[in-house]
Amino acid sequence: DADVTQTPRNRITKTGKRIMLECSQTKGHDRMYWYRQDPGLGLRLIYYSFDVKDINKGEISDGYSVSRQAQAKFSLSLESAIPNQTALYFCATGDSKNTGELFFGEGSRLTVL
Amino acid sequence: QKEVEQNSGPLSVPEGAIASLNCTYSDQGSQSFFWYRQYSGKSPELIMFIYSNGDKEDGRFTAQLNKASQYVSLLIRDSQPSDSATYLCAVNSGGSNYKLTFGKGTLLTVNP
């Protein structure tokens, strides 16, 4: 089983719908991140959390919200999805006690029609 | 806006050659640097990290860092077709608050 698990792996939805992407990890890491990846734009940081009570905006947080329900769980919500939120979303974890390496989940491909 | 720039490629090299991937960054305060490999449709995976000026070698891979020039590179010796992937440069400029900024990636193709 993957150490960083994302659900769903693929989702097609319609404009205006609420969508939640979930991430859970068994690595025991304190830091969790949400990135989106678009062709030609690379990975961009949406939100990040350094512990359960800590939530921080990344460079492209507009239209998104997050919840850190537990150290192992970090969910990303799109309250009202729009087509330009069609992308590949990655959850990542990191350990504040090590080198700063991020470990990525397998990705969630979201299509908003 | 902290920026990380990479040549998007594609970079094409013959099998057995040295592939050279380059990255520049804008934030002079950046402290640690990472190279990730991403196969098509897969998630990024770490190849190497480097903190200090100079070279760091790990098997066929060598990372090079020049903080004065704000430049980091990755050399892949004896390139193999299995090295064909997109290589992402990532920079941490947040100190102990690790928050990586990624470049857009360079697509490498190794031809048999």
Image (spheres, rainbow, N blue to C red):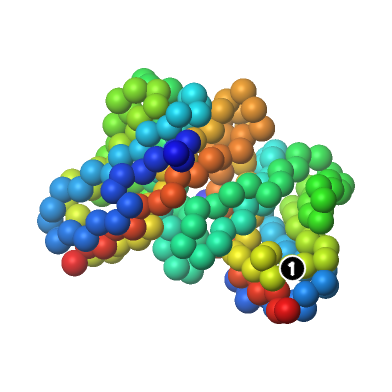
Q: Is residue A12 above or below residue B34?
A: below
Compared to residue A104, the image places residue B72 above or below, namely below
Q: Residue furthest front?
A: A1
> Where in the figure is residue A16, as x and y percent of width and height?
12, 56
- Which residue is at the front of the view, B27 or A7? A7
- Where residue B72 appears, x then y in whole percent? 75, 54
Whether residue A73 is visible here, answered yes or no, is yes
Q: Quadrant of residue B5?
A: bottom right
Name the residue at 66% across, 32% down.
A99
Label total for image: 1
Which quadrant of the view contains residue A11?
bottom left
Mark 1 lies on residue: B80
Residue at image point 82% right, 51% down: B59
Q: Chain of mark 1?
A: B
Q: Element at badge 1?
A: loop
> How far across and down, in percent of the image, does residue A90 sit?
42, 48
Quadrant in which the C terminus of chain B appears? bottom right
* Residue B19 drawn at (x, y percent): 77, 68
